[in-house]
Image: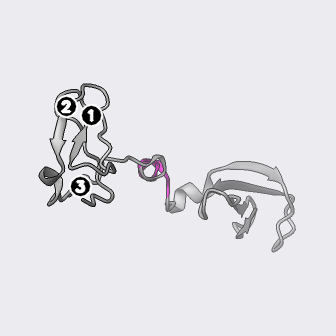
């Protein structure tokens, strides 16, 4: 008998049965119930899982991650003393978003408070 990849359990006590013995019967080591190996000769195990059977933390977090911004959200943000590359103004507003994979830095979006020039950097 060759039952590869299949787990056979005792129907009386639930113990995992050892199907690798050389005799014609499989005996439970806990309750000593005996099963003929021929009973498992044509054993076919089919397993299925529903999509939500193994929830992923990352997959569930996808619903709370922002993937786009509205125009008025780009103007919001903290201000920082940073020189605008276009007009030379000394103050810019900024905000960050995680646009790449979680093990990489966030993207920082800058907006000049004077001329409205926008640019971004990847940290």
Residue 95 on image: x %, y %:
67, 54
Q: Which residues are magenta?
A: 60-66
Secondary structure under tag 1 reads loop
Q: Quadrant of the N terminus?
A: bottom left
Q: Residues within 10 Å of mark 1 (few under 14, many from 20)?
A: many
- Residue at x 43% of width, y 53% of height: 59
Q: Nearer the viewer, residue 90 or 37?
A: 37
Disc 3/disc 2 C-alpha distance (Å): 26 Å
Would you say 101 lies left or right of 80 here? left
Please identify, in this view, whether the residue under mark 3 or under mark 2 is nearer the observer. 2
Q: Which residue is mark 2?
A: 33
The number of discs equals 3
Secondary structure under tag 2 reads loop
- Residue at x 76% of width, y 49% of height: 79
Q: Which residue is mark 3?
A: 47
- Residue at x 66% of width, y 55% of height: 96
Residue 28's disc is: 1
Would you say the residues marked 1 and 2 are in contact, meaning their CB atoms lie under 8 Å apart? yes
Residue 118 on image: x %, y %:
69, 69
Q: Nearer the viewer, residue 28 or 13?
A: 28
Among the two numbered marks 1 and 2 on one chain, the one whose residue lies closer to the N terminus: 1
Disc 1/disc 2 C-alpha distance (Å): 5 Å
Q: Nearer the viewer, residue 9 or 89?
A: 9
Disc 3/disc 1 C-alpha distance (Å): 24 Å
Q: Quadrant of the C terminus?
A: bottom right
Please identify, in this view, whether the residue under mark 3 or under mark 1 is nearer the observer. 1
Residue 62 among those drawn in magenta? yes
Residue 95 among those drawn in magenta? no
- Residue at x 62% of width, y 51% of height: 76
Q: Residues within 10 Å of mark 2 (few under 14, many from 20)?
A: some
């Amino acid at each position: 008998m060759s039952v590869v990849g299949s787990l056979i359990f005792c129907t009386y006590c639930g113990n995992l049965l050892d199907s690798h013995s050389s005799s014609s019967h499989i005996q439970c080591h806990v309750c000593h119930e005996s099963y003929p190996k021929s009973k498992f000769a044509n054993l076919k195990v089919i397993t299925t899982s529903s999509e939500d059977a193994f929830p992923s933390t990352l997959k569930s977090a996808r619903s709370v991650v922002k993937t786009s911004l509205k125009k008025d959200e780009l103007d919001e943000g903290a201000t920082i003393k940073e020189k605008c590359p276009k007009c030379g103004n000394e103050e810019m507003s900024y905000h960050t978003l995680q646009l790449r994979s979680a093990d990489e830095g966030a993207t920082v979006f800058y907006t000049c408070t004077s001329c409205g020039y926008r640019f971004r950097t990847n940290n």
